Image (cartoon, grey):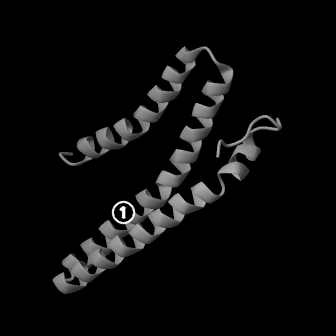
Amino acid sequence: MKLELPGVLMLFLENLNMEVLVLMAGLMHDVNQNAAMVVVVGLGQILIMIGYGTSLQVVTMVGNALGSNKPQEALSNTKMVACVSAVLGLIVCFGSFALRSTLVGFYTHKESASVRE
């Protein structure tokens, strides 16, 4: 029980910050800004799942290796997942940047909505 409560609190606060940002965007009294904020938060939540899933994977792999008394395997698993996470992070960043015009098109049908170059 000592570890569950801090873990639940951490996940709660990670997700709560996005919801607070959306509520604060509602104070701007501009529908377009509010809609943009909701889209950015939605896409952010989706992209965060890649890193979150990878972190859960490494916890399991390292825990299994340490439980089997194989510290070298745990260390190599940690290094491998760190490299894979860095590559995935770069792919997500560059992919989001390259597809920014397409992503705007998914959420609007107006010709005036475009990404500023």
Look at 61% across and 25% down and name the residue there.
34
* Residue in the foreground of this view, choosing between 117 and 44: 117
Image coordinates of residue 14 in percent, x first then y, are: 38, 40
Please tell me which residue is depicted at 36% across the width and 43% down the height of the picture.
11
Quarter of the picture holding the N terminus: top left
Q: Residue at x 52, y 53 (%)?
A: 47
Horizontal side, residue 51 vs residue 70: left or right? right
SS for callout 1: helix
Q: Is residue 71 visible?
A: yes
* As drawn, 18 above or below 46: above
Residue pointed to by mark 1:
55
Residue 69 appearing in the image: no
The crowding category of the residue bearing disc 1, from other C-alpha atoms within 10 Å (few below 14, some 14 to 19, many at least 20), is some
Residue 89 placement (x, y as % from top left):
45, 63
From the top left corner, tell me how far across and down residue 35 is, in percent: 65, 29
Front residue of 109 and 116: 116
Q: Is residue 32 above or below residue 109?
A: above
Q: Is 82 positioned to the left or the right of 70 in the image?
A: right
Residue name at image x 39 percent, y 68 percent: 86
Q: Where residue 95 sits: x, y (%)?
A: 59, 61
Query: Which kind of residue does numbered mark 1 sit on?
Result: Ser
